[in-house]
Amino acid sequence: MLTLTGGIERRGRLPRGGCVVVANHSSHADTAALLAALDARHTPAIGAAADYWFASPWRSRVCRRLAAGFPVRRTGGGLDDLLAVAGELEAGRAVVLFPEGTRGGDGSVGSFHRGALVLAERAGVPVVPVGIAGTDRLLPKHGRLRSSLVRVRIGAPLPSSVTPEEARSAVAALHGRTNAESLRDSRARRAVAAVAASRAGLLIAFVWAFAEALSWPLMPELLLGIACAAAPYAALRLSLTALAGSLAGSLLALQLAGAGVGLPAPLTTDRMRAQVRHELSLTQADAVRNQPWNGIPFKVYAAEAGRADVPAGDWLMSAAAARGSRTLTVGLAFAALGVLLRRYRRFYRAYLVLLGGGFTLGLTLIVSGWQ
Protein backbone atom coordinates (compact mmCIF):
# COMPACT_ATOMS: atom_id res chain seq x y z
CA MET A 1 0.00 0.00 0.00
CA LEU A 2 2.83 2.38 0.85
CA THR A 3 4.46 1.58 -2.50
CA LEU A 4 1.30 2.74 -4.25
CA THR A 5 1.04 5.95 -2.21
CA GLY A 6 4.58 7.22 -2.78
CA GLY A 7 6.97 4.56 -1.55
CA ILE A 8 8.92 3.88 1.63
CA GLU A 9 12.64 4.14 2.39
CA ARG A 10 14.41 2.60 5.37
CA ARG A 11 17.81 3.25 6.91
CA GLY A 12 19.27 1.09 9.64
CA ARG A 13 18.28 -2.27 11.11
CA LEU A 14 17.14 -3.66 14.42
CA PRO A 15 19.74 -5.47 16.55
CA ARG A 16 19.51 -9.23 16.99
CA GLY A 17 17.19 -10.48 19.68
CA GLY A 18 14.31 -8.84 21.44
CA CYS A 19 14.08 -5.05 21.71
CA VAL A 20 11.65 -2.27 22.50
CA VAL A 21 11.17 0.08 19.55
CA VAL A 22 10.16 3.66 20.41
CA ALA A 23 9.05 5.96 17.62
CA ASN A 24 7.47 9.35 17.07
CA HIS A 25 3.75 9.33 16.33
CA SER A 26 1.89 11.74 14.06
CA SER A 27 -0.35 9.53 11.93
CA HIS A 28 -2.26 6.25 11.82
CA ALA A 29 0.08 5.42 8.92
CA ASP A 30 3.02 5.16 11.36
CA THR A 31 2.07 1.57 12.19
CA ALA A 32 2.01 0.58 8.52
CA ALA A 33 5.36 2.30 7.99
CA LEU A 34 6.96 0.41 10.87
CA LEU A 35 5.50 -2.93 9.83
CA ALA A 36 6.88 -2.35 6.33
CA ALA A 37 10.32 -1.23 7.54
CA LEU A 38 11.06 -3.64 10.40
CA ASP A 39 12.41 -7.06 9.47
CA ALA A 40 10.14 -10.08 9.68
CA ARG A 41 12.41 -12.13 11.93
CA HIS A 42 11.51 -9.83 14.82
CA THR A 43 7.75 -10.40 14.20
CA PRO A 44 6.97 -6.93 15.62
CA ALA A 45 4.01 -6.47 17.96
CA ILE A 46 2.47 -3.01 18.05
CA GLY A 47 1.14 -1.42 21.22
CA ALA A 48 -2.18 0.31 20.47
CA ALA A 49 -4.49 2.50 22.55
CA ALA A 50 -7.08 0.26 24.15
CA ASP A 51 -9.70 3.00 24.32
CA TYR A 52 -9.50 3.61 20.56
CA TRP A 53 -8.36 0.52 18.67
CA PHE A 54 -10.07 -1.99 20.96
CA ALA A 55 -13.23 0.00 21.62
CA SER A 56 -15.26 -1.95 19.05
CA PRO A 57 -15.06 -5.52 17.70
CA TRP A 58 -14.21 -4.52 14.14
CA ARG A 59 -11.42 -2.15 15.16
CA SER A 60 -10.04 -4.80 17.45
CA ARG A 61 -10.00 -7.35 14.63
CA VAL A 62 -8.29 -4.91 12.26
CA CYS A 63 -5.68 -4.02 14.85
CA ARG A 64 -4.90 -7.59 15.91
CA ARG A 65 -4.94 -9.24 12.50
CA LEU A 66 -3.39 -6.57 10.30
CA ALA A 67 -0.99 -4.93 12.75
CA ALA A 68 -0.30 -7.63 15.37
CA GLY A 69 -1.60 -5.06 17.85
CA PHE A 70 -2.13 -5.54 21.55
CA PRO A 71 -4.10 -3.19 23.83
CA VAL A 72 -2.44 -0.66 26.12
CA ARG A 73 -4.71 1.30 28.47
CA ARG A 74 -4.10 5.05 28.60
CA THR A 75 -6.32 5.71 31.63
CA GLY A 76 -4.66 3.44 34.21
CA GLY A 77 -3.27 -0.08 34.05
CA GLY A 78 -1.15 0.59 30.97
CA LEU A 79 2.09 -0.50 32.63
CA ASP A 80 0.57 -3.85 33.51
CA ASP A 81 -0.46 -4.27 29.86
CA LEU A 82 3.11 -3.62 28.77
CA LEU A 83 4.73 -5.91 31.30
CA ALA A 84 2.39 -8.68 30.17
CA VAL A 85 4.26 -8.86 26.84
CA ALA A 86 7.73 -9.16 28.41
CA GLY A 87 7.79 -12.80 27.41
CA GLU A 88 7.57 -11.76 23.75
CA LEU A 89 10.82 -9.80 24.16
CA GLU A 90 12.56 -12.79 25.70
CA ALA A 91 11.48 -14.81 22.67
CA GLY A 92 13.28 -12.35 20.38
CA ARG A 93 10.33 -10.29 19.20
CA ALA A 94 10.29 -6.52 18.81
CA VAL A 95 7.64 -4.66 20.76
CA VAL A 96 6.81 -1.34 19.09
CA LEU A 97 5.48 1.50 21.21
CA PHE A 98 4.65 5.16 20.69
CA PRO A 99 5.68 6.68 24.05
CA GLU A 100 3.95 9.99 23.28
CA GLY A 101 0.69 8.11 23.86
CA THR A 102 -1.19 9.84 21.07
CA ARG A 103 -0.66 11.38 17.66
CA GLY A 104 1.01 14.77 17.57
CA GLY A 105 -0.28 17.40 15.21
CA ASP A 106 2.50 19.99 14.92
CA GLY A 107 5.35 17.84 13.57
CA SER A 108 7.35 17.92 16.82
CA VAL A 109 8.09 14.99 19.13
CA GLY A 110 6.24 15.29 22.45
CA SER A 111 7.29 14.10 25.88
CA PHE A 112 7.67 10.35 26.46
CA HIS A 113 5.89 8.24 29.07
CA ARG A 114 8.06 5.82 31.03
CA GLY A 115 6.18 2.57 30.25
CA ALA A 116 8.26 1.51 27.24
CA LEU A 117 11.50 2.06 29.14
CA VAL A 118 10.28 0.17 32.22
CA LEU A 119 9.36 -2.75 29.95
CA ALA A 120 12.84 -2.76 28.36
CA GLU A 121 14.54 -2.60 31.76
CA ARG A 122 12.44 -5.44 33.22
CA ALA A 123 13.10 -7.64 30.19
CA GLY A 124 16.78 -6.65 29.94
CA VAL A 125 16.58 -5.67 26.26
CA PRO A 126 17.78 -2.53 24.45
CA VAL A 127 15.64 0.41 23.45
CA VAL A 128 15.79 1.21 19.72
CA PRO A 129 14.82 4.77 18.69
CA VAL A 130 13.12 5.19 15.31
CA GLY A 131 12.32 8.40 13.43
CA ILE A 132 9.41 8.40 10.98
CA ALA A 133 8.86 11.17 8.43
CA GLY A 134 6.27 11.63 5.69
CA THR A 135 3.34 9.88 7.36
CA ASP A 136 1.96 13.21 8.57
CA ARG A 137 1.69 14.24 4.90
CA LEU A 138 0.49 10.80 3.75
CA LEU A 139 -2.36 10.57 6.27
CA PRO A 140 -2.64 13.71 8.43
CA LYS A 141 -4.47 13.66 11.73
CA HIS A 142 -8.17 14.11 10.86
CA GLY A 143 -7.14 14.33 7.19
CA ARG A 144 -7.46 12.18 4.08
CA LEU A 145 -5.00 9.88 2.35
CA ARG A 146 -2.72 11.46 -0.24
CA SER A 147 0.62 10.73 -1.90
CA SER A 148 3.85 11.04 0.08
CA LEU A 149 7.17 9.26 0.34
CA VAL A 150 7.63 7.77 3.83
CA ARG A 151 11.07 7.52 5.40
CA VAL A 152 11.97 5.39 8.42
CA ARG A 153 15.35 5.79 10.12
CA ILE A 154 16.32 3.17 12.71
CA GLY A 155 18.86 4.45 15.22
CA ALA A 156 21.54 2.76 17.31
CA PRO A 157 20.28 0.73 20.31
CA LEU A 158 20.13 2.53 23.66
CA PRO A 159 20.68 0.78 27.02
CA SER A 160 17.58 -0.31 28.92
CA SER A 161 18.49 2.19 31.65
CA VAL A 162 17.93 5.17 29.31
CA THR A 163 15.76 8.00 30.63
CA PRO A 164 12.55 9.17 28.89
CA GLU A 165 14.19 12.46 27.91
CA GLU A 166 17.23 10.72 26.44
CA ALA A 167 15.01 8.39 24.44
CA ARG A 168 12.85 11.30 23.26
CA SER A 169 15.96 13.26 22.21
CA ALA A 170 17.25 10.30 20.20
CA VAL A 171 13.92 9.87 18.39
CA ALA A 172 13.60 13.63 17.80
CA ALA A 173 17.10 13.76 16.30
CA LEU A 174 16.32 10.87 13.94
CA HIS A 175 12.96 12.39 13.00
CA GLY A 176 14.53 15.80 12.36
CA ARG A 177 17.25 14.41 10.09
CA THR A 178 14.80 12.18 8.24
CA ASN A 179 12.26 14.97 7.79
CA ALA A 180 14.92 17.37 6.52
CA GLU A 181 15.93 15.06 3.67
CA SER A 182 14.41 16.39 0.48
CA LEU A 183 13.30 14.17 -2.38
CA ARG A 184 15.20 15.32 -5.44
CA ASP A 185 12.96 16.31 -8.30
CA SER A 186 13.23 17.38 -11.91
CA ARG A 187 12.36 20.94 -12.84
CA ALA A 188 10.91 19.60 -16.07
CA ARG A 189 8.57 17.30 -14.14
CA ARG A 190 7.46 20.12 -11.86
CA ALA A 191 6.75 22.35 -14.85
CA VAL A 192 4.77 19.64 -16.67
CA ALA A 193 2.87 18.75 -13.48
CA ALA A 194 1.90 22.37 -12.91
CA VAL A 195 0.45 22.64 -16.42
CA ALA A 196 -1.17 19.19 -16.32
CA ALA A 197 -3.01 19.99 -13.09
CA SER A 198 -4.31 23.32 -14.43
CA ARG A 199 -7.12 24.29 -16.78
CA ALA A 200 -4.51 24.84 -19.45
CA GLY A 201 -3.59 21.17 -19.19
CA LEU A 202 -7.18 20.13 -19.76
CA LEU A 203 -7.43 22.46 -22.75
CA ILE A 204 -4.23 21.02 -24.25
CA ALA A 205 -5.52 17.46 -23.75
CA PHE A 206 -8.84 18.28 -25.43
CA VAL A 207 -7.29 20.14 -28.38
CA TRP A 208 -4.61 17.48 -28.93
CA ALA A 209 -7.14 14.63 -28.99
CA PHE A 210 -9.60 16.67 -31.10
CA ALA A 211 -6.89 17.42 -33.67
CA GLU A 212 -5.69 13.79 -33.74
CA ALA A 213 -9.20 12.61 -34.58
CA LEU A 214 -9.13 14.95 -37.59
CA SER A 215 -5.59 14.97 -38.93
CA TRP A 216 -2.84 15.38 -36.28
CA PRO A 217 -0.50 12.34 -36.48
CA LEU A 218 0.44 12.02 -32.78
CA MET A 219 -2.07 10.08 -30.68
CA PRO A 220 -3.25 11.58 -27.37
CA GLU A 221 -1.77 8.62 -25.47
CA LEU A 222 1.64 10.23 -25.99
CA LEU A 223 0.41 13.36 -24.20
CA LEU A 224 -1.05 11.22 -21.41
CA GLY A 225 2.29 9.46 -21.04
CA ILE A 226 4.00 12.82 -20.58
CA ALA A 227 1.42 14.43 -18.31
CA CYS A 228 -0.02 11.60 -16.21
CA ALA A 229 3.38 10.33 -15.10
CA ALA A 230 4.25 13.86 -13.97
CA ALA A 231 0.91 14.57 -12.28
CA PRO A 232 -0.67 11.18 -11.43
CA TYR A 233 -3.61 12.62 -9.54
CA ALA A 234 -4.67 14.66 -12.56
CA ALA A 235 -4.71 11.53 -14.75
CA LEU A 236 -8.43 10.80 -14.60
CA ARG A 237 -9.38 14.37 -15.50
CA LEU A 238 -6.84 14.46 -18.33
CA SER A 239 -7.93 11.07 -19.69
CA LEU A 240 -11.62 11.96 -19.65
CA THR A 241 -10.89 15.30 -21.30
CA ALA A 242 -8.79 13.62 -23.99
CA LEU A 243 -11.62 11.15 -24.57
CA ALA A 244 -14.09 14.01 -24.98
CA GLY A 245 -11.75 15.69 -27.46
CA SER A 246 -11.37 12.46 -29.46
CA LEU A 247 -15.11 11.94 -29.68
CA ALA A 248 -15.82 15.55 -30.61
CA GLY A 249 -13.11 15.52 -33.28
CA SER A 250 -14.33 12.20 -34.67
CA LEU A 251 -17.89 13.52 -35.03
CA LEU A 252 -16.57 16.48 -37.01
CA ALA A 253 -14.41 14.18 -39.14
CA LEU A 254 -17.47 11.98 -39.75
CA GLN A 255 -19.50 14.97 -40.98
CA LEU A 256 -16.69 16.40 -43.13
CA ALA A 257 -15.91 13.07 -44.77
CA GLY A 258 -19.62 12.47 -45.39
CA ALA A 259 -19.75 15.85 -47.15
CA GLY A 260 -16.81 14.89 -49.37
CA VAL A 261 -14.18 16.97 -47.57
CA GLY A 262 -10.81 15.20 -47.42
CA LEU A 263 -8.42 16.15 -44.62
CA PRO A 264 -4.67 15.41 -44.57
CA ALA A 265 -3.90 12.08 -42.90
CA PRO A 266 -0.14 11.84 -42.37
CA LEU A 267 1.40 8.52 -41.28
CA THR A 268 -1.52 6.52 -42.68
CA THR A 269 -1.57 4.15 -45.66
CA ASP A 270 -3.98 2.99 -48.36
CA ARG A 271 -3.92 -0.49 -46.84
CA MET A 272 -5.18 0.93 -43.54
CA ARG A 273 -8.09 2.61 -45.28
CA ALA A 274 -8.93 -0.53 -47.27
CA GLN A 275 -8.96 -2.60 -44.07
CA VAL A 276 -11.26 -0.13 -42.33
CA ARG A 277 -13.66 -0.05 -45.31
CA HIS A 278 -13.80 -3.85 -45.21
CA GLU A 279 -14.55 -3.87 -41.45
CA LEU A 280 -17.23 -1.18 -41.84
CA SER A 281 -18.94 -3.21 -44.59
CA LEU A 282 -19.22 -6.11 -42.15
CA THR A 283 -20.09 -4.50 -38.81
CA GLN A 284 -20.81 -0.81 -39.50
CA ALA A 285 -20.02 1.40 -36.48
CA ASP A 286 -18.85 -1.55 -34.37
CA ALA A 287 -15.79 -1.79 -36.63
CA VAL A 288 -14.13 0.92 -34.51
CA ARG A 289 -13.88 -1.59 -31.65
CA ASN A 290 -10.90 -3.09 -33.50
CA GLN A 291 -9.04 0.23 -33.45
CA PRO A 292 -7.38 -0.07 -30.01
CA TRP A 293 -5.63 -3.28 -31.09
CA ASN A 294 -4.71 -3.07 -34.78
CA GLY A 295 -2.67 0.16 -34.83
CA ILE A 296 -4.83 1.92 -37.41
CA PRO A 297 -5.29 5.57 -36.35
CA PHE A 298 -8.65 6.65 -34.98
CA LYS A 299 -8.97 9.35 -37.63
CA VAL A 300 -8.98 6.72 -40.39
CA TYR A 301 -11.99 5.00 -38.82
CA ALA A 302 -13.79 8.34 -38.35
CA ALA A 303 -13.22 9.46 -41.93
CA GLU A 304 -14.12 6.13 -43.52
CA ALA A 305 -17.22 5.86 -41.33
CA GLY A 306 -18.33 9.25 -42.69
CA ARG A 307 -17.80 8.10 -46.27
CA ALA A 308 -19.80 4.93 -45.49
CA ASP A 309 -22.70 7.04 -44.15
CA VAL A 310 -22.56 5.47 -40.67
CA PRO A 311 -25.16 7.22 -38.46
CA ALA A 312 -23.58 9.68 -36.02
CA GLY A 313 -25.40 8.18 -33.01
CA ASP A 314 -24.23 4.66 -33.75
CA TRP A 315 -20.72 5.92 -34.32
CA LEU A 316 -20.62 7.87 -31.08
CA MET A 317 -21.72 4.91 -28.97
CA SER A 318 -19.24 2.49 -30.50
CA ALA A 319 -16.40 5.02 -30.54
CA ALA A 320 -16.99 5.97 -26.90
CA ALA A 321 -16.66 2.33 -25.83
CA ALA A 322 -13.60 1.59 -27.95
CA ARG A 323 -11.76 4.86 -27.46
CA GLY A 324 -12.77 5.19 -23.83
CA SER A 325 -11.37 1.81 -22.80
CA ARG A 326 -8.03 2.57 -24.42
CA THR A 327 -7.67 6.18 -23.34
CA LEU A 328 -8.62 5.59 -19.71
CA THR A 329 -6.49 2.46 -19.42
CA VAL A 330 -3.43 4.20 -20.82
CA GLY A 331 -3.89 7.33 -18.74
CA LEU A 332 -4.35 5.46 -15.47
CA ALA A 333 -1.48 3.10 -16.27
CA PHE A 334 0.89 6.04 -16.71
CA ALA A 335 -0.47 7.55 -13.49
CA ALA A 336 0.29 4.31 -11.64
CA LEU A 337 3.79 4.36 -13.11
CA GLY A 338 4.25 7.92 -11.88
CA VAL A 339 3.20 6.93 -8.36
CA LEU A 340 5.33 3.78 -8.23
CA LEU A 341 8.42 5.62 -9.49
CA ARG A 342 7.87 8.75 -7.42
CA ARG A 343 11.22 8.49 -5.66
CA TYR A 344 12.96 8.51 -9.06
CA ARG A 345 11.20 11.59 -10.39
CA ARG A 346 14.55 13.37 -10.72
CA PHE A 347 15.03 11.21 -13.84
CA TYR A 348 11.92 12.58 -15.52
CA ARG A 349 13.92 13.98 -18.45
CA ALA A 350 15.38 10.53 -19.11
CA TYR A 351 11.85 9.12 -18.90
CA LEU A 352 10.73 11.58 -21.60
CA VAL A 353 13.58 10.47 -23.84
CA LEU A 354 12.65 6.80 -23.37
CA LEU A 355 8.97 7.55 -23.90
CA GLY A 356 9.65 9.53 -27.08
CA GLY A 357 12.03 6.90 -28.39
CA GLY A 358 9.61 4.07 -27.66
CA PHE A 359 6.73 5.95 -29.23
CA THR A 360 8.75 6.73 -32.37
CA LEU A 361 9.87 3.12 -32.72
CA GLY A 362 6.35 1.80 -32.20
CA LEU A 363 4.83 4.25 -34.68
CA THR A 364 7.48 3.40 -37.27
CA LEU A 365 6.81 -0.32 -36.93
CA ILE A 366 3.03 0.16 -37.17
CA VAL A 367 3.18 2.36 -40.29
CA SER A 368 5.71 0.11 -42.03
CA GLY A 369 3.60 -2.93 -41.15
CA TRP A 370 0.61 -1.36 -42.89
CA GLN A 371 2.49 -0.28 -46.01
Image: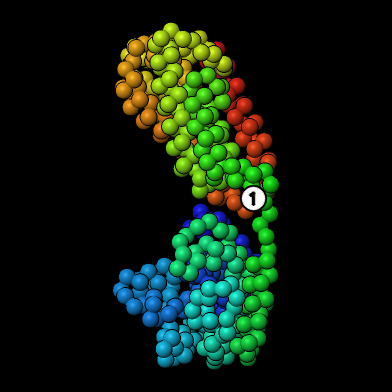
Which is nearer the eye, 146 or 280? 146
- Residue 221 appears in the picture as rendered: no
Quadrant in the rendering for residue 8: bottom right
Residue at the image point whose x is 67% and y is 76% from the top: 173
- Quadrant of the image for the C terminus? top right
**Residue 310 percent coordinates (x, y):** 33, 15
- Residue 34 appears in the picture as rendered: yes
Residue at the image point whose x is 37% and y is 20% from the top: 287
Residue tagged by mark 1?
344
Q: Could you classify mark 1 by the number of other residues whose Cα lies within 10 Å: few (under 14), some (14-19), or many (20 or more)?
A: some
Is 49 placed above or below 118 here? above
Side of 120 relative to 312 (left or right): right
Is 204 placed above or below 81 here? above
**Residue 306 percent coordinates (x, y):** 39, 14
Quadrant in the rendering for residue 158: bottom right
| Tally of numbered tags | 1
Residue at the image point whose x is 50% and y is 66% from the top: 140
Is 293 placed above or below 104 here? above
**Residue 147 percent coordinates (x, y):** 53, 56
Side of 209 relative to 356 (left or right): left
**Residue 44 percent coordinates (x, y):** 50, 74
Residue at the image point whose x is 54% and y is 87% from the top: 113
